[in-house]
Amino acid sequence: MSTQDELRPTLTTEAGAPVADNQNTETAGVGGPALIQDQQLFEKLAHFNRERIPERVVHARGAAAYGTFTLTADVSRWTRAAFLSEVGKQTETFLRFSTVAGNLGSADAVRDPRGFALKFYTEEGNYDLVGNNTPVFFIKDASKFPDFIHTQKRDPYTGSQEADNVWDFWGLSPESTHQVTWLFGDRGIPASYRHLNGYGSHTYQWQNEAGEYFWVKYHFKTDQGIKNLAQDEANRLAGEDPDSHQRDLREAIERGEFPTWTVQVQIMPAEDAANYRFNPFDLTKVWPHEDYPPIEIGKLELNRNPDNVFAEVEQSIFSPGHFVPGIGPSPDKMLQGRLFAYADAHRYRVGINADHLPVNRPHATEALTNSRDGHLYDGRHGRRKNYEPNSFGGPVQTGRPLWASTPVTGATGTHEAPSHAEDDDFVQAGNLYRLFSEEEKQRLVAGLAGFIAKVSADRDDIVERAVENFRKADADYGRRLETAVRELRKQG
Ligand code: HEM
């Protein structure tokens, strides 16, 4: 035995007892069956069987890094959030990028929105902004989300994603036309996680010290520049290097090339909302920049890789319901549904004490609740009382709501989202199409047509409904698409 071997620590069981043989199972005689007293073998096999937790039902595939947010502008007239209180103030962050539809082991270089889930570890608790690389979304009501995702995932019979299901749903959900146009445009396949913008997407509320509130949208503009992959490049890369995005992010940070994003907000005074030309809480719409120009407020830098992917990325949890004082929700019905869905997913996927894990717990303050126990509770509260009110000096409520209350009118009911003066499902899709260069229009139409043409030969009705939505967005868009789809379907 070399001196180096002598210095090595002893391999142990989970209980810390030395392992005598990690190569051979204990058997009854040489070549005989295994013995139940080989507890080391059973412990190893049993633990291995339990290595996986349920993957995220969407956004299962992702990569993450820690970083720093620096405030570069005075925003105190709009929000009293402490981490946004002073120019130059820095806040630790954790950002997880993801694709949406693929499973945990799927490839990175695919046409799909990218998740942009950002945790700010603030001194008033963790603030999560769970956005995408797209400023809009496919649907505008949370009740449609499970149906939508079912069409993106695997068909119950074939076990594959089916063009029939995707285009059936999108054709019957015209509000998706804007986001689908975005997705099949050049930005639909980012070259890496470093080369995309992030958006809060929803409208959120900011409230200032005086109690006034504003509606806000967040934009994170990549300082690396937008870079995308053409469809054929992506197809090749997805096969040759399925981990392309994940590797790119990790290696850039290892090289000390820290990616950064310029953070901007659009601010809408509360009194504008009722009469704005678009419903400002409709997630299928943007606020055109000429209406509410983006204002630069900060810089986000990613500068540290997680040490352990399972502990810090797979078990990380982000919730649109994690707000801090001075920031709150808007009445966007998608956002309202998400306020329930994420924490519920976390309890199922990671467990009731998910918030206690190092990546998830507050880093700049301490969580002081009276919730206790449950699976894998680590006893962190010691002898402290676990009820309130108490007369033992326990934590007390502030009496100050985190965000402003907003007026409501009307009767309860399953209402459609209110429609404002210029609202329809197509106007912004058409505007986006007309913004594209001629080359991008051609790539957009080719991409859409290639996918629509895969709809089953006997379901022309699905094709027609799908094309009709793009026709309504822009006549030229519809015409080109119809021709391209017809050609491809003729070729069979
Ligand atoms: C009502 C609509 C939606 C519902 C019900 C929903 C639900 C979910 C659920 C259950 C997860 C998995 C959470 C987990 O297991 O940790 C998830 C992940 C995610 N969702 Fe949504 N989602 C919705 C819409 C959106 C929208 C509009 C965006 C972006 C603007 C978005 C961005 C994300 C991101 C980025 C993740 C991954 C978070 C992470 O990295 O852990 N989702 N969503």
Image (cartoon, grey):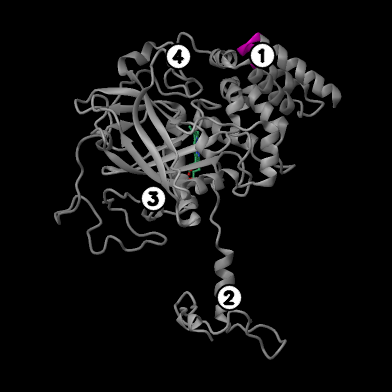
Question: Which part of the image, by quadrant, shows the N terminus?
Answer: bottom right
Whole-Å distance between the Cαs marked 4 and 2? 62 Å
Seen from the viewer's position, the closer of residues 478 and 417 is 478
- Residue 478 to residue 378: above or below: above
Whole-Å distance between the Cαs marked 2 and 3? 32 Å
Do the numbered discs 1 and 4 sit on residues whose CB atoms are within 8 Å?
A: no
Q: In the drawing, does residue 343 fall left or right of residue 151?
A: left
Q: Which residue is mark 2?
A: 42
Q: Nearer the viewer, mark 4 or mark 3?
A: 3
Q: Which residue is mark 3?
A: 360
Residue 198 position within the rendered picture, expressed as x and y whole percent measured from the top left = 46, 32
Q: Quadrant location of residue 386?
A: bottom left
Is residue 471 highlighted in magenta? Answer: yes
Mark 1 or mark 2: name the one nearer the start of the chain.
2
Residue 214 position within the rendered picture, expressed as x and y whole percent measured from the top left = 31, 22
Question: Which part of the image, by quadrant, shows the C terminus?
Answer: top right
Q: In the drawing, does residue 85 fall left or right of residue 93?
A: left
Which amino acid does the dot numbered 3 rest on? Asn
Q: Which residue is mark 4?
A: 278
Which amino acid does the dot numbered 2 rest on? Phe
The magenta segment: 470-475
Q: Nearer the viewer, mark 2 or mark 3?
A: 3
At horizontal 36% and vertical 30% (from top left) the residue drawn is: 329
Seen from the viewer's position, the closer of residues 417 and 469 is 469
Whole-Å distance between the Cαs marked 4 and 3? 36 Å
Circle 1 — which element? Answer: helix
Q: Which mark is residue 477?
A: 1
Residue 346 position within the rendered picture, expressed as x and y whole percent measured from the top left = 45, 48
- Residue 19 to residue 411: above or below: below
